Amino acid sequence: MTITASLTETPLRARRTRFDLSETPLHWVPDDPLATHVMNVLHIMLPPGERWFCDVYREALPLVTDEKLRADMKGFMGQEATHARAHEAGREYLSRYGIDTDRTMAQAEWARRNLGSATPFGRTLPKPLRKTWLITRLSVIAAVEHFTAVLGDWILNESTALDAAGVDAAMMDLLRWHGAEEVEHRSVAFDVYQHVSGNYVRRLISMSAIAVVLTLGFIIGTAQLLSADQTTKRRFSLHEFRRAGRRGHIPTFTFALRAIPTYLRRDYHPSQEGSTEAAIAYLNASPGVVAR
């Protein structure tokens, strides 16, 4: 399918980073364990997911004939691999406070190998199904990347309440660096899907499924982290979640829900949202980026 929307304007590249979380307190959002652990879920959820993105894109590269888009895919893979490595610092920070994420990570890696691969459970699919399965996974990645771009824009531009609350600077730098790169490469996954297929019904189904999966993932992940946190008696509740949202410490449910109909517009393209200039400006200033 021919791409009609604009591709990424500037070449994408992985940046070398170093985020030192050795002095980061357990509740790095002061007096708000729930908001802290809502965002700590990213350290667990993202690394296996981002490695999976790279797996699928390596498989999809032969189907992409546009050279600019191929270059964007390679830059995207480099950034996603860097994100996965950087969030290992987040897992180390959690481990330092006695929160073990190894079992959850092992389960996620099992799902990556057995549910998301070209050969599910080690079985080779019949030839007619192979491309369909690949396109389905590309549509899922496009849906996920819509949410990561929206959240990336939030952490860059709408999280000033966190700064006012006195959050840990190193953790915020890690999250804002990641958010800025999500905004920077926000068009790639959508453009790849449009190039290889672009089927609107599949796009609708994938977004519907991903909205449910991500919501459950954050709820379950936050509940598990709060339960493992021996320094607080607070547990996950919708009341506490709404309270953290009203304080501006996390995106609200309404904010997240508004992203869904936007993606489902037939004329939607990620370039219509966020600002590459704002993302690059942060990346050029981030203390954690050591090679720009």
Image (spheres, grey):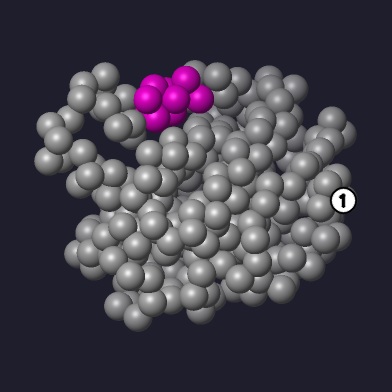
Image height check: is 86 above or below 180? above
Image coords of residue 103 (percent x, y):
49, 19
Image coords of residue 251 (percent x, y):
57, 62
Q: Residues within 10 Å of mark 1 (few under 14, many from 20)?
A: some
Q: Residue at x 60, y 38 (%)?
A: 81
- SS of the residue at dot 1? loop
Front in this rendered view, residue 118 or 182? 118
Q: Residue at x 22, y 59 (%)?
A: 202
Based on the picture, tell me whether residue 110 belongs to the magenta stretch. Answer: yes
Say whether residue 251 is left or right of residue 175.
left
Image height check: is 85 above or below 146? above
Front in this rendered view, residue 168 or 32? 168
Image coords of residue 80 (percent x, y):
58, 44
Based on the picture, tell me whether residue 23 belongs to the magenta stretch. Answer: no
Front in this rendered view, residue 105 or 32? 105
Instruction: Give the image quarter of residue 278.
Output: bottom right
The mark tally for this picture is: 1
Image quarter where the N terminus lies is bottom left
Q: Is residue 161 visible?
A: no
Where does the magenta region start and end? Answer: 105-113
Say whether residue 210 is left or right of residue 68.
left
Image coords of residue 17 (percent x, y):
78, 42
Say whether residue 2 is left or right of residue 232.
left
Q: Residue at x 33, y 34 (%)?
A: 116
Taken as a whole, is the magenta stretch helix, strand or loop?
A: helix
Q: Residue at x 56, y 67 (%)?
A: 8
Q: Is residue 202 visible?
A: yes
Instruction: Give the image quarter of residue 183.
Output: bottom right
| Pointer 1 residue | 287
Q: Amino acid at mark 1?
A: Pro
